[in-house]
Image (cartoon, helix red, strand yellow):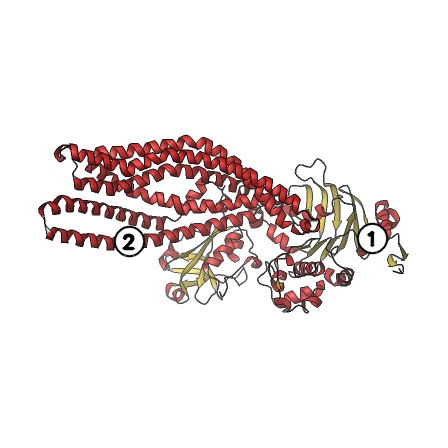
Amino acid sequence: MAAARYHGTRLDSRDFRPLPGEEVPSPATLVAWMRDSGLWAKAVRLRWRNLLRLQSDAPVVLLLSDGSAALLVGRDVAREVVYLKDPRTPPGDPPVAVDELRLLQLWQGTALLVRRMRGASPEEEPFSLAWLARMVLGERRILREVVASSLTLSVLQVLPPFLVMIAIDRVLTHQSMSTLILISLIMALIVGYETVLGYARRELVEIMSTRIDVRLNLHVFARLLALPIDFFERMPTGGTTHRISQVFKIRDFLTGKLLSTFLDMFTLVVLLPFLFWISATLAWMVLAVSTVIALVVLAFLPPIRRVWGTMIEAEIKKGAVLVETVHGIRTVKALALENARKLEWDERVADAGQARLQAGRIANWAQTLVTPLERFVDRGVLLVGAYLVLTTPSELSGISTGALIAFMMLGTRVAGPLIGLAKLIQDIEDVRSSVTQVGEVLNNPTETAATRGGLRPVFEGAISFNEVTFSYPGSKTAALDKVSLDVAAGTMLGVVGRSGSGKSTLTRLLQGMNRDYAGFLKIDGTDLREINLTYLRRSVGTVMQDNFLFRGTVLDNIVAGRPNLTLEDAVHAARLSGAEEFIERLPRGYETWIEESAANLSGGQRQRLAIARALVADPRILILDEATSALDPESEALVHANLMRIAHGRTMVIVSHRLASLVDCDQILVMDRGRVADIGRHAELVERCAIYRHLWMQQNRHVETHGVRPVPKPVIA
């Protein structure tokens, strides 16, 4: 943390995620923590002489053997000492001079180099073929080993055909048994060496493919999570998931066809000169046919590209229907919409099938034209070579029976890569389309810069809106229009208004969901746009009307995203929210497993768990956006009974349509058409605010009031 402060960044301990079973933080874990906080960091191995030669004035973190760390803040080459500082000591304490002997007793050579991030981080670069190429080239070490093994295997592939040629032209002619035995031994050695080397190369390729696959999946998911909420609200879920699923096609191409063709190129480079040495005539024939195949493939690329575009669009629409139906299956069942959804699905399937059929027909024509050329390479060259052997003396044609067989053994290994290279162009076009689809999702503006940079002030909870105006993209009217109000720290603020008055928009801005507003929104005097976004959202607890619970235990859902919290923290939050009473009645208490969509919990139980999840980190600001609307009367009464305890020491913003639940608030904000209509206590608003009085009378026209609290009339059923 001291090294981060030197670079103007504050590390949040809540962001630190140690690996399971990791008692002492590893260098990799520390590096990941600092990089997620907007710093450039790298773990290195240094020696004493490296420490003396370091030219940087920035502190270097030395990881000591006992699990602690020290800051290298200076060095004296003449005295051969370095100056270390304990990061836990006050900033004014002087560093300690340490020589090589004393340092090496505590330090094994591991250090962390830390500096500010310069330019855009690699995670922010646009997703493209160039980015993929750089990712593959990042495995240079393994690539060099794979290239070396491929060249060796290519050379080994040259020897067997020549040994066969010698066996046919020399051994059979001269009946030399000793030469045959020698050739057999050499062949056996080549096969053994080729087997071992082939295993090693396949192992290296699998390791490299796995690393590329992992890096690609991690990048895609991290980039997806970094997209702002308005992207997901604007884009259909089915279209997004279909586009993201194209990353698996890209992965298969990178680790499959591209890599195999790349390795075959080494075989081509090594074997092609030997083909010309055996027979230039036949070698030119192989090259000419392969060139014609490439031209045929290139000629079909434009129509294939057009048809694929139609097919992709049809598949996206089909996927959107599927995801939407599964997501809303309760509504489909409740309203008997099965036939309507099935009809729409049938239409989408028909469109996708028609587009796929057209694409298949074009590809079929291309393959039909290419097939005779491929067969000519396999069989026609053999017939032409046999004709040359029969009609032309070997002294003139330069080819004998053994040479013809050797040529065919080598030719099949050369023609395959040539034809594969021609077809690779078509595969690249397919992958280019997939990259474009994934890029349509991942290349949208992200929140990464806001989550890594920015201030991390200590919150008290004072909120200030000053002429805040905000409009949703594509909307002609402002959701908030010059809203100004001040909320003191520790205030319980109720927010009411008709539908569409801007209540939820107000809370969205407080959570940093939208930052492109005009005016000033401040928390404790700090502009919200200058605050680190992750820090802001962790300091502002939010409970919505429809909360999502993840698959996992009750405890996992309460402490979600906060691994440093304990069971005691979860129990305290559950007690405040009123969830403790039903959690204790569950079969396994806090270890009870919650199914997908929390189907094994009632609506009220889900809502109380969501409130506990918001309270567990003890946020300074708590937002309840229609949080009790889904609760049954008993659960709602339980939450409201705890409301004063929940509000203790924090600012609360309670959005509710039920005005009776807000009568105890310190202030009630009345919104109307994106503007502040009035703000005050309940009794004041009933007297002077027509909108509030109308809403109050609308909700309480069937009850008698005693003071300010409604009391229901007795009802005989």
Residue 215 x/y as whole percent = 46, 50
* Up/down of 569 relative to 122, above or below: below
Q: Which residue is mark 1?
A: 681
At label 1, the amino acid type is Arg
Query: Residue at point 12% right, 47% down?
Result: 171
User: How many labels, in total?
Assistant: 2
Say which label, 2 or 1, has the lower sequence index.
2
Which amino acid lies under the numbered mark 2 shown in the image of this protein? Leu
Task: Check the image and report above or below for 439 versus 571.
Answer: above
Q: Is residue 635 left or right of residue 319?
A: right
- In the rendered image, which quarter is residue 254 located in? top left
Q: Nearer the viewer, residue 390 or 631?
A: 390
Q: Nearer the viewer, residue 357 or 466?
A: 357
Q: Secondary structure at mark 2?
A: helix
**Percent of width and height locating residue 435:** 48, 41
Q: Nearer the viewer, residue 290 or 539?
A: 290
Q: Write down the residue under mark 2.
A: 197
Give the image location of residue 694, x and y in percent: 86, 47
Residue 470 visible to the viewer: yes
Helix, strand or loop at label 1? It is loop
Q: What x and y, as percent, mark residue 414?
A: 28, 40
Residue at left offset 44%, top offset 40%: 130
Q: Is residue 323 left or right of residue 658?
A: left
